Image (spheres, helix red, strand yellow):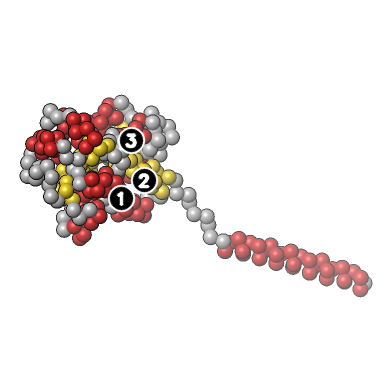
């Protein structure tokens, strides 16, 4: 009888031990935090001016706070950004070359194109104004630069700014190549191009936002020509067409377009730069 009691006791103890381990295991599992939902990447191909001006540093965290996407920003020339769109290598585009953008929409590579904001291009150069162009019209200024053989630094990268620069030379019936070695093609973004122009005491075309954001790095560079109607700089946002490019994050792209034209974002754009520069770097359409 004693042996039977001993066996029964052992069985009871084993049951309690196993049950306790199971409960402990379950309890520990319950304590573990649930895995976070994965944040899919959303690729934004955009012009360097939105990056160099600092605007995207403000907008990106706000977008990611409202939407479950990891916004990956690729800041290149507008031409390169549009090329990424035609190859389906980006989900959404934020660019400033209207004629080229329209071609992308016509080809079916981009959809849902929306006007976002604008600023203007300006011609900047050395404070001593070697070519004496301050206050002139764009054609007069470019003519003076070619006659004086002053240095002119071009983006040379098929960006929206480069496209605008070539358009202005053409409108002025001038060929920048007549400058010879004084016509320097940087092949770089706006910030780097401005720095080269400053070092060479040359002139360059830039968007106002990037110039104001970079001005502290080039105190001897000033605005030479501004206010010409031909210098308007318009930005659009658009989705890359997922029906043509199947790998595109269509939902994320649509969310970003809607974010950019929302009232909250428009308010941030309108106020951006005012505290630091005393004026906004971008303007909204009425």
Residue nearest the viewer, comparing 266 with 278:
278
Q: Quadrant of residue 113?
A: top left
Query: Residue 100 location, x and y as percent?
Result: 25, 31
The tag earlier along the polypeptide, 2 or 3, is 2
Could you say which disc has been placed on residue 73 in the image? 2
Q: Quadrant of residue 131?
A: top left
Residue nearest the viewer, comparing 282 with 203:
203
Query: Residue 35 location, x and y as percent?
Result: 52, 55
> Could you tell me how far apart the alpha carbons at marks 2 and 3 are, in whole angstroms?
13 Å
User: Is 3 on the left or on the right of 55, as rendered?
Assistant: right
| Discs 3, 1 touching: Cβ within 8 Å | no
Give the labeled residue for mark 1. 56
| Callout 1 secondary element | helix
Give the labeled residue for mark 3. 80
Q: Residues within 10 Å of mark 3 (few under 14, many from 20)?
A: some
User: Is 246 on the left or on the right of 34, as rendered?
Assistant: left
Query: Residue 126 location, x and y as percent?
Result: 16, 48
The residue shown at (56%, 61%) is 32
| Discs 2, 3 touching: Cβ within 8 Å | no
Q: Quadrant of residue 229?
A: top left
| Discs 1, 2 touching: Cβ within 8 Å | yes
- In the image, residue 91 above or below residue 10: above
The image quadrant where one finds the N terminus is: bottom right
User: Is 67 on the left or on the right of 125, as rendered?
Assistant: right
> Could you tell me how far apart the alpha carbons at marks 3 and 1 are, in whole angstroms?
18 Å
């Amino acid at each position: 009888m004693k042996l039977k009691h001993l066996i029964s006791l052992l069985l009871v103890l084993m049951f309690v031990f196993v049950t306790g381990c199971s409960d402990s295991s379950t309890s520990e599992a319950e304590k573990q935090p649930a895995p976070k939902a994965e944040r899919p990447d959303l690729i934004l191909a955009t012009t360097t001016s939105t990056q160099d001006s600092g605007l995207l540093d403000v907008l990106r965290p706000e977008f990611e706070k409202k939407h479950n996407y990891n916004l990956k920003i690729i800041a290149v020339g507008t031409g390169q950004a549009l090329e990424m769109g035609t190859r389906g290598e980006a989900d959404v585009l934020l660019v400033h070359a209207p004629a080229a953008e329209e071609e992308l929409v016509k080809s079916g590579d981009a959809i849902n194109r929306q006007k976002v904001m604008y600023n203007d291009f300006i011609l900047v150069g050395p404070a001593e104004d070697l070519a004496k162009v301050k206050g002139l019209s764009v054609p007069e200024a470019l003519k003076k630069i070619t006659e004086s053989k002053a240095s002119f630094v071009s983006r040379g990268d098929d960006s929206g700014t480069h496209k605008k620069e070539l358009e202005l030379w053409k409108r002025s019936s001038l060929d920048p190549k007549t400058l010879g070695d004084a016509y320097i093609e940087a092949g770089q973004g706006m910030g780097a191009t401005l720095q080269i122009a400053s070092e060479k005491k040359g002139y360059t075309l830039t968007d106002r936002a990037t110039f104001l954001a970079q001005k502290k790095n080039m105190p001897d560079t000033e605005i030479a020509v501004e206010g010409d109607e031909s210098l308007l700089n318009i930005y659009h946002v658009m989705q890359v067409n997922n029906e043509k490019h199947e790998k595109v994050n269509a939902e994320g792209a649509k969310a970003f377009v809607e974010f950019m034209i929302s009232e909250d974002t428009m308010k941030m754009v309108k106020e951006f730069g005012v505290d630091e520069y005393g004026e906004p770097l971008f303007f909204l359409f009425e």
